[in-house]
Image (cartoon, helix red, strand yellow):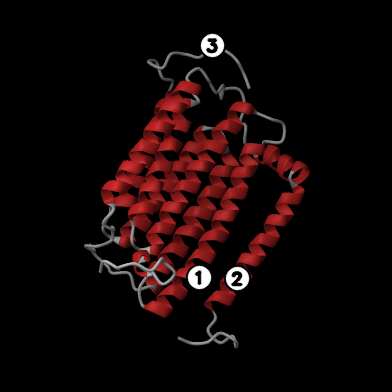
């Protein structure tokens, strides 16, 4: 936690400009994810969102997290979601009723949450500054040290959790397991 | 870089996720919105890790853990959605009302 005099907001550095542009791309594509009427397009805009976030991680010098983000989210999660859309016979093309009737309430809740969080964050962290010039904070060596020294036990527990999720997904998807009654 | 930039971005992303969860009818789109919220949390963790800078990089390690759990969650979630589709021929979350409180169902 470094305390130093932060530069002014009105003279952003090059990194900050790049981060802001990436943030705009991320927010815009995320907005399209939650508002588009075409289901497949939502999944594809999700790729842009995750890619923009990976760029943000790189701007925060967290390289490992950025590449894991690209591998897991863009590579695996979006493909899984597209498979899910295909297997549930999602309609291709604009779909009139992808949104439920509580759109005003949802927008009000989201806007209220955004106003509260942004006000709180700006008030609390206005003077906090990240000195990112001298070193990367997320090199593979540093993350590996932390992961396999201090966090070995959670890491192993997580592998058991993944195994349990795998077995659970298989049990849920198989239709020939005896014992379950058919509808 | 000012810490406010990543934090505000993460807060806005989280709110977009909230909006998506509340407004979408298709269960897979709800899952996508949940992924948006998890990503917002990840950005927060990474930003605070770059600020706090402890020796073991807790924030980034936690972000990796969250990514792993999100992968497990989306796998299980899709299995449940597929089961729902197989049993009911529909993945609209507001049509899966069997466990709701008994009231007059408005269409």
Q: Quick one: label 2 or label 3, which is nearer the N terminus?
A: 3
| Residue A118 placement: quadrant | top left
Residue identified by numbered label 3 = A5
The chain letter for the residue carrying disc 1 is B
Secondary structure under the numbered disc 3 in the rendered image? loop
User: What is the number of the mark on residue B79?
Assistant: 1
Label 2 sits on a secondary structure element that is helix
Q: Residues within 10 Å of mark 3 (few under 14, many from 20)?
A: few
Q: Is residue B15 left or right of residue A72?
A: left
The answer to whether marks 1 and 3 sit on the same chain is no
Image spot of residue B98 (x, y percent): 41, 72
Crowd band around label 1 with a 10 angstrom C-alpha radius: few (<14), some (14–19), many (20+): many
State if disc 1 and disc 2 touch (CB < 8 Å).
yes
- Residue that badge 2 annotates: A168
Residues at marks 2 and 1 on the same chain = no
Q: Relative to B7, is A26 on the left or the right?
A: left
């Amino acid at each position: 936690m470094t305390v130093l005099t932060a530069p002014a907001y009105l003279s952003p550095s090059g990194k900050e400009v790049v981060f802001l542009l990436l943030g705009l791309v991320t927010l815009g594509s995320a907005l399209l994810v939650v508002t588009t009427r075409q289901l497949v397009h939502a999944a594809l805009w999700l790729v842009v969102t995750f890619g923009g976030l990976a760029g943000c991680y790189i701007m925060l010098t967290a390289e490992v997290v950025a590449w894991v983000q690209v591998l897991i989210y863009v590579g695996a999660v979006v493909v899984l979601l597209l498979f899910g859309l295909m297997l549930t016979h999602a309609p291709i093309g604009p779909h009139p009723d992808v949104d439920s009737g509580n759109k005003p309430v949802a927008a009000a809740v989201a806007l209220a949450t955004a106003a509260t969080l942004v006000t709180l964050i700006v008030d609390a962290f206005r003077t906090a500054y990240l000195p990112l010039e001298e070193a990367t904070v997320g090199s593979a060596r540093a993350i590996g040290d932390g992961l396999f020294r201090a966090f070995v036990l959670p890491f192993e527990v997580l592998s058991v959790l993944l195994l349990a999720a795998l077995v659970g997904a298989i049990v849920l998807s198989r239709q020939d397991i005896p014992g379950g009654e058919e509808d | 870089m000012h810490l406010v930039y990543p934090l505000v971005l993460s807060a806005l992303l989280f709110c977009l996720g909230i909006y998506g969860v509340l407004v979408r009818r298709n269960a897979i789109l709800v899952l996508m919105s949940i992924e948006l919220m998890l990503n917002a949390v990840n950005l927060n963790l990474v930003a605070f890790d770059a600020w706090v800078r402890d020796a073991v990089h807790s924030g980034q390690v936690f972000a990796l853990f969250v990514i792993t759990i999100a992968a497990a969650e989306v796998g299980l979630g899709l299995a449940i959605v597929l089961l729902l589709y197989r049993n009911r021929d529909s993945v609209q979350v507001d049509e899966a009302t069997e466990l709701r409180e008994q009231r007059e169902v408005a269409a």
